Image (cartoon, rainbow, N blue to C red):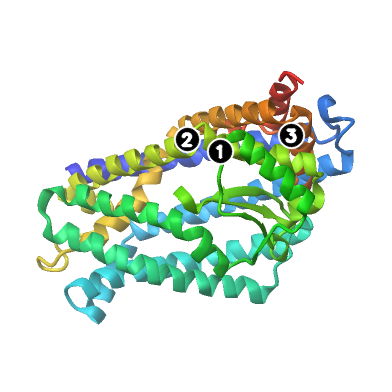
Amino acid sequence: MYSLAFSILFVSFLLLTLVVRFWLASRHIRHVLANRAAVPPEFAEKIRLAAHQKAADYTVAKTKLGLLALLVNSAVLIGFTLLGGLQWLSIEVFKLAGPGMAYQLGLLVAFAAISGLLDLPFDYYKQFKLEQRFGFNKMSKALFFADMAKGLLLGAAIGLPLIWVVLTLMEKTGGLWWLYAWLVWSGFQLLMMVLFPSVIAPLFNKFTPLADESLKTRIEGLMRRVGFASKGLFVMDGSKRSAHGNAYFSGFGANKRIVFFDTLLARLAPQEIEAVLAHELGHFKLKHIVKRIGMMFAISLAFLALLGYLKNQLWFYTGLGVDPLLLAGQPNDAMALILFMLALPVFTFLLGPLTSLSSRKHEFEADAFAASHTDARDLVSALVKMYEDNASTLTPDPLHSAFYDSHPPASVRIRQLNLAPQ
């Protein structure tokens, strides 16, 4: 009875999510196309009509591709769950691996491999068709597959030991396994923040010290004014993959470093680069990073506690098309992890605007911080160039943006900056 009710609830939320997402996408497409013919008045002197129309076409193309991927992924989700795909996969892996940890890890690897293969056509099309069509792709097919191979090897080297630890905790530490797993997961996340800048990121990109001495002096002056210490200023060869540009800082504690895409340095003036960096430093100085990490840890603890309950509920498995007693008493914690990962987004999608609301608040605060330490007009001009170069639409549908965009719409953000003291 409970399993049937859960199946109905799962399908109902999945259909609701599909309807809402299609509705939001159709609103977004209509809104962007309705405003395609003219640049918004506040940008009329800054952005060419051709660039505005390119951004509209790029946005519509990405949205349509996203809808196709959504349909396919939803069908795959039903296939894995209610149509018995995971049940079949579990049996086949058990035949090959036998009982124990080999089966558990094998099931997760098999599931990840199948999911990756199903995603591959969309990733390939996006990179070599959609991005190529709009002039953003700089990646060769050899580099695309080399990145994929590196990602798989890195995922196996890092992910498999972590999963082994989590599965061992699930099996051997009793009812509070989720608390111990959370402590391991939190420690792992912090370790990755420390290792990413100097160990992981260089596996995919080349990082060279910033050579422009005048720009370096300007940036170091900004960092002294705001009290930020870093391990260095670096330029990343983002242009070998994409024409998109950005800047960020990464790392944790004493391992922080500032990174500029080479495409960004080629496009922005020194004072604009300083303003963009001041925005990023604002996130650090206003403790947005710490707040986000704290929120991530709190949410992961809540979800692991929920999984700790669901893992022992028969209806959770049978309601999603799996017989948990399939292996005659052998642990099937890997199946619990997979089912939880598949079901969770279905039930949490409608909470998206809450996350976006918090993120947007942080963006406004970081903009205000930048305006207090640099000229707000420099940040405005930098943002306009970045919106144009990245073909980011200036006219998103407000409701679609509230669900999906972590940053405020361009017009709202720039209007707020124009109100800052000059």
Q: At 26% from the left edge and 43% from the top edge, which residue is drawn? A: 6
Q: Look at label 3 and name its amino acid.
A: Leu
Callout 2 environment at 10 Å: few (<14), some (14 to 19), or many (20+)?
A: some
Q: Look at label 2 and name its amino acid.
A: Gly
Q: Position of residue 22 (x, y in %)?
A: 56, 40
Q: At 46% from the left edge and 52% from the top edge, which residue is drawn? A: 74
Q: Look at label 1 and name its amino acid.
A: Tyr
Position above or below: 160 against 44: below
**180 or 89: nearer the eye?**
180
**Label 2 SS:** helix
- The label nearer to you, 3 versus 2, is 3
Point out which mark residue 352 bears.
Answer: 2
Q: Quadrant of residue 124?
A: bottom right
Callout 3 environment at 10 Å: few (<14), some (14 to 19), or many (20+)?
A: many
Question: How much space separates mark 1 and mark 3, taking CA atoms?
Answer: 24 Å
**287 or 175: nearer the eye?**
287
Point out which mark residue 404 bears.
Answer: 1
Q: Which residue is label 3 attached to?
A: 379
Where, quadrant-wise, is the C terminus in this rendering?
top right
